[in-house]
Image: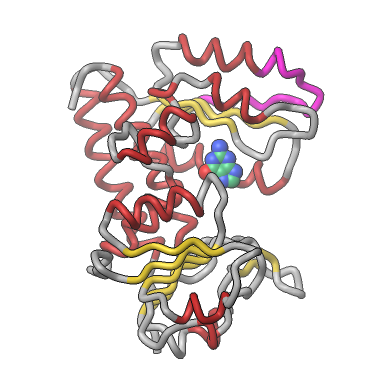
Amino acid sequence: MAIRIDGKAVAEKVRAKVAIEVEELKKQGVTPGLAVVIVGDDPASRTYVNNKKKACAQVGIYSEEYALPASTSQDELMELVAKLNAKKDIHGILVQSPLPNGLDEKAVVEAIHPEKDVDAFHPSNVGRIMIGNYHFLPCTPAGVIELLRSENIEIAGKNCVVIGRSNIVGKPMAMLLLHNNGTVTICHSKTKNLKEVCRNADILVAAVGKPKFVTADMVKPGAAVIDVGMDRDENGKLCGDVDYENVEKVASYITPVPGGVGPMTIAMLLQNTVTAAKSQNGLK
Ligand code: GUN
């Protein structure tokens, strides 16, 4: 039976460390500040944004919410980003995705000052990640690496398979595993022999967005299986991309949904906000 990696507990440790850093910064006259922008009324986005604000408050980070109606124009959104770029008490800017139809998300992300881009979605930050010289790591992939570290799971020399090639998770995840000297394969909808490729993985990261997509026969006995999915099963219950009940019998480590990667994403966002506040104030 696999060891269940407790993302809530690991995230709590990261948050405790961040809270100490925030306290130190405040002594030096700097309060880290995060602006969270939400456009429209997508219920999942609302929940994420509420959780992010709550997490900020818990560690002493100042946060501002900008909730805009779905009818907001591109120009209005770009103006807000420009205003936040110039705001001295705001060190991190996060525009919750997805944006309502008709708004150009790429243009919005590119308008965020790279040093305030705590999601690490700006092309300049993506490029920095590629060459391993970065301000920030993208929150979810960075959270996955922390989870592996928390259990001393070796990445160097291991076969790492990432299912999914999104810009937010799959691609940066593969890059971080590579920076940690993993031998990395990215799988996607056109991959041939997906099952065989996955069965070769010592570390399998599922970021497909399909409920219980990874079944036990796709998992190498003893593998570490990390589930980035946030899906709904046939009964509408929250589940991940991994068929947890069956995969836990084969894997050596597994992350649950909820309570695995999810809490880590927010913890890493807090960490990035502190990093941003430090660098914008010439502190280390
Ligand atoms: N929507 C879902 N996940 C994320 C995230 O990590 N950042 C932003 N900005 N939007 C998201």
Determine which quarter of the picture holds residue 77: top right
Residue at 41 percent across and 75 percent down: it is: 201
Residue placed most toward the observer, 45 or 186: 186
Q: Quadrant of the C terminus?
A: top left
Let me know if residue 74 is in the magenta part: yes
Judge whether residue 19 can be spotted in this image.
yes
Q: Is residue 280 above or below residue 56?
A: above
* Left or right, 137 with reference to 121: left
Residue at 40 percent across and 88 percent down: it is: 221
Residue at 22 percent across and 39 percent down: it is: 20
* Left or right, 165 with reference to 38: left
Q: Quadrant of the N terminus?
A: bottom left
* x, y percent for residue 140: 45, 50
Residue at 28 percent across and 35 percent down: it is: 133
* x, y percent for residue 2: 39, 84
Residue placed most toward the observer, 8 or 71: 71
Task: Tell me which image quadrant ligand 1 sits in.
Answer: top right
Span highlighted in magenta in the image = 64-77
Q: Is residue 10 above or below residue 200?
A: above
Judge whether residue 49 can be spotted in this image.
no
* Left or right, 14 with reference to 258: left
* Left or right, 175 with reference to 63: left
Q: Is residue 217 above or below residue 257?
A: below
Furthest-front residue in this view: 192
* x, y percent for residue 188: 59, 62
